[in-house]
Amino acid sequence: MQVFDQVRDMQLQSLSWRAAGWRIAFVPTMGNLHEGHLDLVREAARRADQVVVSVFVNPLQFNDVADFQRYPRTLNDDLRQLSKLNVAAVFTPGEAAMYPEGRESVTRVEVPQLTDELEGAHRPGHFTGVATVVTKLFQAVLPDVALFGEKDYQQLLVVRKLVADLNLPLEIVGRPTRREPDGLAMSSRNRQLSADERRQATRLYATLQWVAEQVRAGQRHFAELEAGAWEQLVTAGFEPEYISIRSAADLRLPAGGEPLVVLGAARLGRVRLIDNLRI
Ligand code: PAF
């Protein structure tokens, strides 16, 4: 397994794989890998000849400096886990490699409308940071296919849209959310929960399941359901940010009859959790 920390070195390796006719699959991450990431890596290996994983905690997508500073960084452990899988290269650029002239002046990629609500409304600038870094990572790794977890559902749609709008020649694959045995969606942030918060945290998924069951049972008063879910989260000790039933295809408000997704974000102490469930 090779490790590259410069964009040009990564590109040269990918160009030589492409010249040899090999297919490249890419899994972008911010490190602190868990089973959800490893599932993406295993699926990547099924879809291509060479698998590249990136580890970069992207400052441009954090709207909260404290959140960026305490984001867990465990590169040695990440490399150890990846070395046991079928990974050809890990791309670990530092900030200077990704934003050599500083991140303030870097050219940005914006995906309007889709990013105005939900995560976008609560984390101003977040999706511009994600869209920008993902585009730059694609240009460094030159993949044929890139894999993303559905836990960050809005992010997955944002990436699909930027790839379509900018005519980027790669396929985007979404993979189902991996969960702990009690239902909590796997996330690097879970490790920041205290033991009590970890027990409470399962209520987020349980609440989304309750909403999904009500919709499946024919309840169509979505605003009432969202308010009921909000109450449940408050009672369980959360500070909810949003609970919203949306069209699964584009996150618009449901018009009727289309596949739906319920999405939620809520704070537990200083940890912000998000989750979603297709209905
Ligand atoms: O989902 C993540 O870990 C990040 O948003 C990503 C896609 C690696 C971009 O920094």
Image (tube, helix red, strand yellow):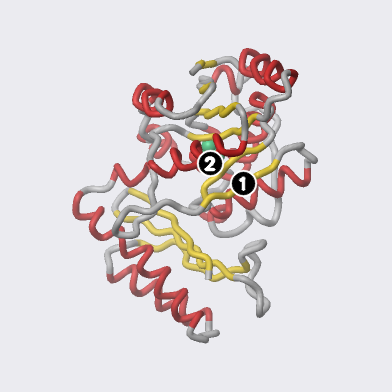
- Residue 99 lies, in percent from the top left, at 60, 22
Which of the two residues, 178 or 221, is positioned nearer the viewer here? 178
- Residue 18 lies, in percent from the top left, at 72, 22
Does residue 89 lie above or below 165 as drawn? Answer: above
Q: Which numbered dot is residue 43?
A: 2
- Residue 127 lies, in percent from the top left, at 60, 45
Disc 1: which residue: 173
Label 2 sits on what residue type?
A: Glu
Q: Given contact means CB atoms under 8 Å apart, are the residues at marks 1 and 2 in contact?
A: yes
Does residue 219 lie above or below 233 as drawn? Answer: below
Q: Nearer the viewer, mark 1 or mark 2?
A: 2
Query: Is residue 206 left or right of 274 when viewed as pictured?
Result: left
Q: Secondary structure at mark 2?
A: helix
Which of the two residues, 96 or 210, is positioned nearer the viewer here? 210
Label 1 sits on what residue type?
A: Val
Q: Secondary structure at mark 1?
A: strand
Does residue 109 lie above or below 197 as drawn? Answer: above
Q: Which numbered dot is residue 273?
A: none
Q: Residue at x 49, y 18 (%)?
A: 1
